[in-house]
Amino acid sequence: MASAAVRLAAQGLGATGATCTARQLVFDVRDFGAVADGQTDNSKAFERAWAKACAAPGRAAVVVPAAGGGGGGGGGYLLHPVVFRGPCKGFVEVRVAGVVRAPAGLDAFRGYHEWINFAGIDGLLVTGGGTFDGRGASSWHLNDCPWKPDCVPPPSSIKLGSVRNATITGVTSLDSKFFHVTIVGSHDVEVSHVSIRAPRDSPNTDGVHIQGSTGVRITDTAVATGDDCVSVGPGSADVTVSGVSCGPGHGISVGSLGRSPGEADVRRLRVSNCTIAGTANGVRIKTWRGGQRSSAAAAAAAAVSGLVFEDIVMRRERRPSVVRISDVKFRNIRGVSATQVAVKLSCSAASPCRGVELRDIDLRYVRRGVATVSRCANVAGGVAGGTLVPPPCI
């Protein structure tokens, strides 16, 4: 089996623009038993192919072909959680041309924080034009992290942990269960020409999260998710984000910072030549309120410095709702409003509200001496009567 799995190839690595003139050992996962039927767990086959490539001197490649070329089936390669561990004897390429799919749900991830974990490797290329499908829709409803700080996070799709000299390029990450790509404790890493996608309402699906890492470059990448396109956490330095198309999502963020004592600093981040469209935020620095108040704790708190945000285009991409709202009555509502705008009717320009009634509304602002107000947009007709505080806008 092993002899059949070794193929010698002299070929160029077009995804990086470099040319390989020496022979490369190629390990096809199908030769180790992988089947692209969408049902067979291929983790052992992938691990065996990785072990061979990692033990090979020089340059070696683990190849995941597209289904159809003798791979069998069109359901992609089902892959349970795996750790591709180094150190390796040489440079290893993981060339994914097919679709690699995570298990649905969370049962297969007990004891795992990541789906695909590259650990302790010096010299790695992940490329090939294929797709890593996290199948997050099956478990997003189980994620309680948005409202529970001590939650157990679902697994991230791809992790680079303690990795050096690594590149991810020319692949797609789809519908991660949590973060798409995490870069932790790593150095000299590039993510370029990658497509990262998840629905705008998918929780915690950050595109690329960086923490405790230096020399990280995120370039020419399109991120459309339900959370931060790029997030830079504690202990990160010399990070470049350039040519990123971001949106939908929450924008490009530093943090959150200050949640835990002893967090390392964030230094020398440059975000440039990016387009941010249809996001909840643009670029921001997120910090936790409170924290330790002692002078010693303040001295140990994380610092943020040397940040540059430049040449960024922000676009608003909001499609008006086409839901028709009519015959709505607000009656006998009284009390205290937390905001000065106590009544706000904000309807769609494409389908204005009709037949709205305001009757006997008495809402006072929490600040004495300041009157409450009403604001209306795209309300096509309505009636108001009785006691009305604030004055009606229809």
Image (spheres, helix red, strand yellow):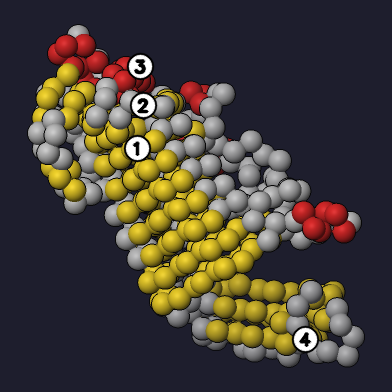
CA gap, disc 1 to disc 3? 23 Å
Q: Is residue 32 above or below residue 257?
A: above
In the image, residue 391 lies at what x, y percent? 73, 90
The residue that mark 1 highlights is 123
Q: Residue at x 80, y 58 (%)?
A: 299
Report helix, strand or loop for mark 2: loop
Whichever of callouts 1 and 2 sits on the residue coming sooner in the sequence is 2
The residue that mark 4 highlights is 372
Amino acid of disc 2: Cys
**1 and 2 marks in contact (CB < 8 Å):** yes
Q: Considering the image in quadrants, where does the C terminus appear? A: bottom right
Whichever of callouts 2 and 3 sits on the residue coming sooner in the sequence is 3
CA gap, disc 4 to disc 2? 67 Å
Number of the label disc, if any, that sits on residue 44: 3
Whichever of callouts 1 and 4 sits on the residue coming sooner in the sequence is 1
In the image, residue 9 lies at what x, y percent? 11, 30
Whichever of callouts 1 and 3 sits on the residue coming sooner in the sequence is 3
CA gap, disc 1 to disc 4? 63 Å
